[in-house]
Amino acid sequence: MLLLAWLLAPALSFASVQGNDNLEYRDYDFNGLETMKVVNTSGKTTITPMPVNKVTISVEKKKFSENCQLNISRSTINQIDAEVVSPSGETCDADINIQVPTDVALDMTTGSGDVDIEGMKGNLKLATGTGAVHSKSSFKNLDIVSGAGDVKLENLNSGGKVTTGSGKVDLKFIDQPNGEFSVKTASGDADVHFPKGTKLNADLDSKGMTDSEFTTYTNGFPLSVKSASGDVEVRSY
């Protein structure tokens, strides 16, 4: 019981940074962590690698009334939660910056704020509203759902899926990927880039333009890109 309490406790108490009541900071030991869960309805969310076995979370409150809530906790040995809670009809704007070891899975829900992720290697599950998503990460697998925000992903080498409404999708793979990948958009364009010589089994479908620079192989990387009205292009580099 004492061991469990020690694992769930943060290494540094949650507190306002001295001299700045709008900046909160928390520091956790990595032990046993598998998932970082983030909920941020308004404000930017940034995830970057932590080179040592610890997790740091800093939150800058931009527009944050006394009715807004910031909840950060280690809910289980395996998971840390960081959540901005907005009362109905009120905007709680806060920028969240997290440093976490690269293999930790990310489970994220955001609203109008942008999401920036760099150097991660675990799984990503992300649901966002109107904010843009930008990542340079080699995820094991990813599942992104976006309403109106653009999605730009670089350094990809594995499977996953991206679904958007009106946002543009821009993907760049760094080598012959594993798994399979699907993209679905309503009105947003989709641009997908692969290194020259990549073997693809591409299925492209749109009422807009579709164009690919690659020959389709039955044993190639399965790529499905479908759009209701946006243009679809698959390019080499």
Image (tube, rainbow, N blue to C red):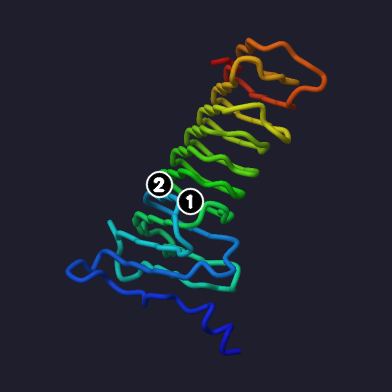
| Residue visible at 42% across and 46% down in the picture | 112
Viewport quadrant of the N terminus: bottom right
Residue that sits furthest to the left in the current view: 19
- x and y percent of residue 42 in the render? 39, 52
- Asked if 6 appears above or below 220 in the picture, the reply is below
- Closest to the observer, 25 or 137: 137
Q: Position of residue 99 (x, y in %)?
A: 42, 56
Q: Which residue is mark 2?
A: 113
Q: Nearer the viewer, residue 184 or 223?
A: 223
Q: Secondary structure at mark 1?
A: strand
Q: Is residue 142 left or right of residue 94?
A: right
Question: Residue flagged by tag 2: what amino acid is it?
Answer: Gly
Secondary structure under tag 2 reads: loop
Looking at the rendering, in which quadrant would you find the C terminus? Answer: top right
Disc ID at residue 144: none
The correct choice, above or below, for 172 with respect to 216 in the image is: below
Please report the residue visible at 43 percent of the width from the left and 43 percent of the height from the top. 116
51 displayed left or right of 183: left
Q: Which residue is mark 1?
A: 110
Instruction: Give, as a three-letter code, the residue at label 1.
Output: Thr
For label 2, the crowd category at 10 Å Cα-Cα, with few meaning under 14, some 14 to 19 and many 20 or more, is: many
Give the residue at the far front of this rendering: 52
